[in-house]
Amino acid sequence: MKAKSPLDIYKLLPQTNCGECGFDTCMSFAAHLLDRSAKPTQCKPLVEQAKKDEKAKKKLQQIEELVAPEIAEVVIGTGDYAVKIGGEDVLHRHELTFFNPTAFFYDIPDTLDDKEIDERCSKVVEYRKFYVGKFLTIEGMAVRCASGDAKRFREVVKKVAGYGRPMILVSLDPKCIRSALEVVADKRPLIYAATEDNWREFLKLALEFKVPVTLRSKDLNTLKSLAVTFRNAGVKDIVLDPITEPLGEGLRGTFERVIQLRRTAINGDKDVAYPIMVTPISAWVIEGDDVAKAYWECVIGAIFIVKYADVMIFKSLEPWTIMPLVILRQNIYTDPRVPVQVEPGLRKIGNPDENSPVMITTNFALTYYTVESDLTSAKIDCWLLVLDTGGICVEAAVAGGQFNASGVKELMKQTGIEEKVKHRYLIIPGLAARLKGAIEDETGWKVLVGPIDSGRIKGWLEQNWPPKNGD
Amino acid sequence: MKIDDLFKLLKKYNIEELEGVRIEGDIEIEIEPGTGILPIIQALAQELGMAAYHLARASKILGFPVEQLFGAELKPEMEKRLEKKEELPRELVKAEFKPYKSEFPGKINEVTLGATPKEGGTRKYTITVGGERSLPFYLFDSEQPHLPVITVDVFDKPVPFPKAVREHYEDVMDNPAEWARKVVKDFGADMVTIHLVSTDPLLDDTPIHEAVKTVEEVLQAVKCPIVVGGSGNKEKDPPLLEKVAEVAEGERVLLASATLDTDWERIANAAKKYNQVVLAWTQLDINSQKTLNRYLLKKAGLSPNSLVMDPTTAPLGYGIDYAFSNMERIRLAALKGDADLAFPISSGTTNAWGAREAWMKESPISGDTSWGPRELRGPLWEILTGLTLALAGVDIFMMLHPASVAVLKDVISMLGGKSKESIDKDWLVVA
């Protein structure tokens, strides 16, 4: 962003410290704008003033420009499922954070029959992977005119649009794209792609239908020339595709082009400061069996999730290729400034009563949500104690001493678990087995050592609960 | 290896096989002692570090307010032009792309593992890692004299592996020397890691003088440089690694590992005396790594060419974001000139197998889309864990599954500019 100091922004704020934005002072608000944890429109007095007063309006505009990200933000689709790409400010996530996760689109060639199209679209819209308290999903469909037939393409695009997800329209033939845009332009699809040969027609389409457009060239001079030409003609929503080559020297060249584009943009070349597209689907041009191709597609996806791709097109809808990629994306785009903890305390899982088991885990978000969802999925009614380990997982917290007997005793006292159950059995994680004796001494409760992985808790309970006499 | 061959390494998935009777065994995971499956440690410390960083950044900037001008005049002009509906341009505006170039003052130390008879050892070849002057595979900034290498795990006793791994090693698990031969000959390992896990007092408590015999056998069996790991027992590892250093005198073995809470000095002294290399292991914290490195170099007097770092590998889905950023910060600091961090990085990529997504038969969570066959997702989990960290600067990967080894080797050679093949076919025509 252009602003380098909170002062740059502070100058333009009302400086009344009214606190309406949610921060105590205008300076604090400015600091939050600088690290992008607040938005200019949170300053209600300025927004109100801007409605009546030209000068205030200009100030608000100036602030918006000052805090605009280095890389342009482009929205694909409309409504709840619209996806925002680009908008990045740094080259390394530890410098701030990465903002808009790489959007995943899946290939739908128009040569498939209707049933196959429905199958693929359903896989996209239904995909779910539970991770740290929520379900990860994938974004949309890249409908590809493989038939060369504008009429068929339009039909398929219309059908796919019915699924309500963002779309990329893929064809180098402007006639095919036009035919599709005539029915789905209001869904704001990304069109793919303008090249050195067809750019004039694509420019016309982008302007006429007001849709984002992908520019495609392996030559970065040409790519930049295309970008400047489109921008000068009034197109703002641009995506750059430096062409993904899947193998050997080609892959190395792709790596270089992607990094050079992003690095040069972040270092000031606004002419290429747009989201980048990478197409792991390129792996499917390699000779070989489908598993090998899907593996390689996944490898290409991973390289460029880590390194700067903002939008991708995949072919494989196998869950074993999607899962590692959605998780890698989640990890790389996690904000390193946000703590990964949940509130310690006592949670009711299902409808526990005075005879239900009592278990304990840590407040590390990943551990907690995994345990909680495993228990819920297995339909277990129980009491779950969440110990404050400073957001550290069980194994490390046992080794590091944050998971200890007196902490457990304290938590049991605070939560009043003694009054909630009649029994005196505490189930501890398998990885905390070595604390069994200490916790028994400290609390006077009998400790049962549970499984190492909470995914196995159901089978474990069947064997061990209710506890047998003398246990 | 060609990508086409990959499938051969991934045994065809077979439902009946999955419904075997060894479910308990199937889902038991070996926690590699000494490296451990370590999702997040010091998450809090990391957070505090981040906060401090931002504070420093803000105050530094506050001290030197920069007046920034901005081109507000550009936008209205563009909008005006739009309104006028100018004719479409006929020609492309010619623009030249001038790539940004990074140059760093620092250079990563080169560390040579293994020694030939001429150099006082018995290895057929040596392996050198390090020497980078740029971020990994940024060949357009600077050449990378040595590409990352892969060392494959061998254990001195049978260990409970996940199914997808076990089927590749079942025949050699009782014989570490055969096992070592297999990973080099059949799976293309650059090096071999022999983990002396049986020395763990809680396992077999194998006496030190007996355990080191396995090291001698492995040295006999393979001609590549080797890594020797202890059991992770804080008391026993230093004398064990000392003895290993003695019996492998002159071989430039990588001794794994010295940590802040073991007798690092004893390990470093043994390495100096018998010409070995030390792996300095810390847990996801750049400052601890710096401290341990300084102790080893300044207090124990280890040569900078005999030190490799293991800043901890938290696997995909279980803290890889910390592992990645920690390594990336370490590497960037080194390139910017921090001599205390300018060492090759090693990764316990095998930790990927601790992720339940790698080994569990199916998701225990209702609402998840089926995870698909674990024979396929397991190796992929290890590949992506390694690949992600390769992009942060790892020089040595400690790995387990042969397919993961093969794929990662391919990627390294391609990104490292060693593969001349290329394919000139557009994905737009994919069937």
Image (spheres, rainbow, N blue to C red):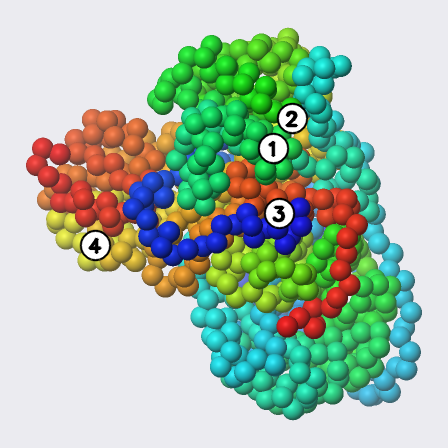
Is residue B238 or residue B91 the one in the foreground?
B238
Compared to residue A176, the image places residue B370 above or below, namely: above
Q: What is the secondary structure assignment of the residue under circle 3?
A: helix
Tell me which numbered mark, 1 or 3, is placed earlier along the sequence: 1
Q: Which mark is residue B184?
A: 1
Residue at 19% in and 58% down: A351
Read off the residue under disc 2. Answer: B224
Tell me the distance, in whole angstroms, between the alpha carbons under discs 1 and 4. 51 Å
Select label 1 or label 4 by which is in front. 1
Marks 1, 4 in one chain: no
* Vertical relation: B429 (above or below) B34: below
The quarter of the displayed image where residue B189 is located: top right
Q: Residue at x 49, y 25 (%)?
A: B176
Q: Label 4 neighbourhood size at 10 Å, few (<14), some (14-19), many (20+)?
A: some
Q: How far apart are the two marked residues, 2 and 3, measured between alpha carbons? A: 21 Å
Q: Chain of mark 2?
A: B
Residue annotated with mark 4: A381
- How far apart are the two marked residues, 1 and 3, measured between alpha carbons? 16 Å
**Separation of disc 3 and disc 4 at Cα?**
44 Å
Rounded to the nearest whole Å, what is the CA distance between mark 2 and mark 1?
A: 8 Å
- Output the chain of dot 1: B
* Mark 2–mark 1 CB contact (< 8 Å): yes
